[in-house]
Structure formats: structure tokens, C-alpha cells
Image (cartoon, rainbow, N blue to C red):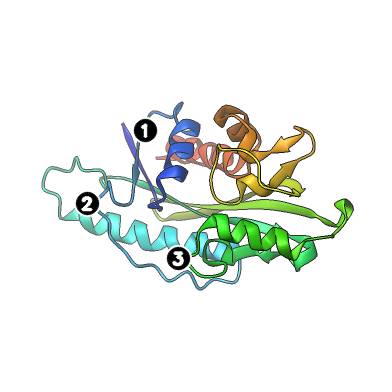
Amino acid sequence: MMNIIFATGNQEKMKEIRMIMADQPANVFSMREAGIELDIVEDGATFEENAAIKAKAVKREADRIAMADPTGSGPCSNAIVLADDSGLEIDYLNKEPGIYSSRYLGEDTSYEIKNRIILERLSGVPEEQRSARFVCAIAIAAGKQIRCVRETMEGRIAWEPKGANGFGYDPIFFLPEYGCTSAQLSPEEKNACSHRGKALQAAKKFIDDYLQQV
């Protein structure tokens, strides 16, 4: 069975990933589960650049671990590495927080505080100027190949946080076609329309094509 290592330590994100990848004949591991401990500097200028930086670094380490594994059966053995960089772009705020979404207002600042401050910055801003999108770029490192896919989920910033599902900025991201925030969607609904769900579907297509070549 194929091994896939996803370059994240975010357990909420891993829940989504495992649900979306459930139809793949693969073992899906987080970095930690694969025994990879890296401090990766994400200094790219775009979501795609940051995703590629992470994918390349984790793939190098996975290959190193695999070469040192005498059994050849560990999580890093012949692993395909996926790494995403995702975030929220708010048009009224010149697409902030963008690639700095996870570090916005400080890495240790809770999303409850981040969301509250975003709502304060948009206080009084009319509906038509509250457009925003979630962006997800996923880099796939398979063999010596690197491919990057990018998808978005369009919406707008809500007037107040709502919903207990999801994580991060989900409670303030309103989806007009659903009439609710992404934090009010069921996991199945969210995975079908989300930036990450769509990007993972594109990544699965690349993986299928890659496996037919090897």
C-alpha cells in the first residue's frame, strides 16, 4: 500500500485530509507520525512557493529516513509527500492576512482573537466590500517530481462568528450559496466545496497519473 506523508502537525487539518483521502489505497501519515521533525522556514512570497518549500524539505528527510531503514517498510518508504499552504484573503484588507494567515497577529495568538480583530477592522464595511476567499496550494513531491495545485473557496466575511465545526477562520467565513459560515457546514459538506478539499482532489488526480507511470 502506498504511503503518503502530509507535511503538517495540525491535527484538525489531518482529520480533514484523512476524510478526503479515504478512498485512496494509501496509509496517510502526519510528519510526526512518520518520524519527521523539521523546523521549516516558510519564506516564500506565495502560497505555492511555501507549499513547495515544505514538500521538498519533508521529501528529502523522508528519503533519508527510508534509506536508513533496514526493513524498508516504514512510513517513509517510497513515500509521496504532500504539503499545503493555505490562508484567508480579504479583499478590503488588500488580501490580508494571506500567506501570513497562521502567523497573523503572532503565531501564539488564538483564532478567537484573530477573528475578533478582523471583524473589528471590517466594522461598518458594507456587504459588497466584504469579499474574501480561502486559498489552498498543495505541492506534491513524488519521486523526483514536484507538482503544485491551487484551489479557492469564495465567500465573504461574516458580521459575527458562527458555528462550532471547522477551525481557524471558519467561523467568520460566510458562504452565500449555503447561507451559513464554513464552521456551520458538516464535515462532508465542507470537504466537498472547500479550498483544501478541491486541492486534494486535484492532488489525487496527479498521484493516480504518477503511479501509472512508475
Numbered disc 1: secondary structure: strand
Is disc 3 placed on a helix, strand or loop? loop
Amino acid bearing label 1: Ala
List x then y, in percent, for residue 117.
65, 63
- Report the quarter where the N terminus lies: top left
| x, y percent for residue 173 | 69, 47
Question: Disc 1 or disc 3, which is closer to the eye?
Answer: 3
Query: In the rendered structure, which disc, 1 or 2, sits on the residue that comes first in sequence?
Result: 1
Residue at horizontal 46%, vertical 33%? 21
Tell me the distance, in whole angstroms, between the alpha carbons under discs 1 and 3. 33 Å
Q: Which residue is located at x 33 percent, y 42 percent?
A: 29
Residue bearing the label numbered 2: 66
| Residue nearest the viewer, comparing 148 with 105 | 105
Mark closer to the chain start, 1 or 3: 1
* Occupied quadrant, residue 129: bottom right
Say few, some or many: other residues with alpha carbon within 10 Å of mark 3 (under 14 / 14 to 19 / 20 or more).
Answer: few
Badge 2 marks a residue whose secondary structure is helix
Look at mark 3 in the image and give the residue it sits on: 108
Where residue 127 appears, as percent x and y from the top left, is 86, 51
The disc at residue 144 is: none
The three-letter amino acid code for the residue at tag 3 is Asp
- Kindly report the distance in space between the C-alpha atoms of the residues bearing marks 2 and 3: 34 Å
Q: Residue at x 27, y 48 (%)?
A: 34
The CA span between labels 1 and 2 is 17 Å
Q: Position of residue 157 (x, y in %)?
A: 74, 51
For residue 175, side relative to residue 124 (left or right)? left
Query: 37 left or right of 14?
Result: left
Q: Amino acid at mark 2?
A: Ala
Q: Are marks 1 and 3 in contact (CB under 8 Å)?
A: no
Specify the quadrant of the image occupied by residue 180.
top right
Residue at the left extreme, as displayed: 70
Residue hosting label 1: 26
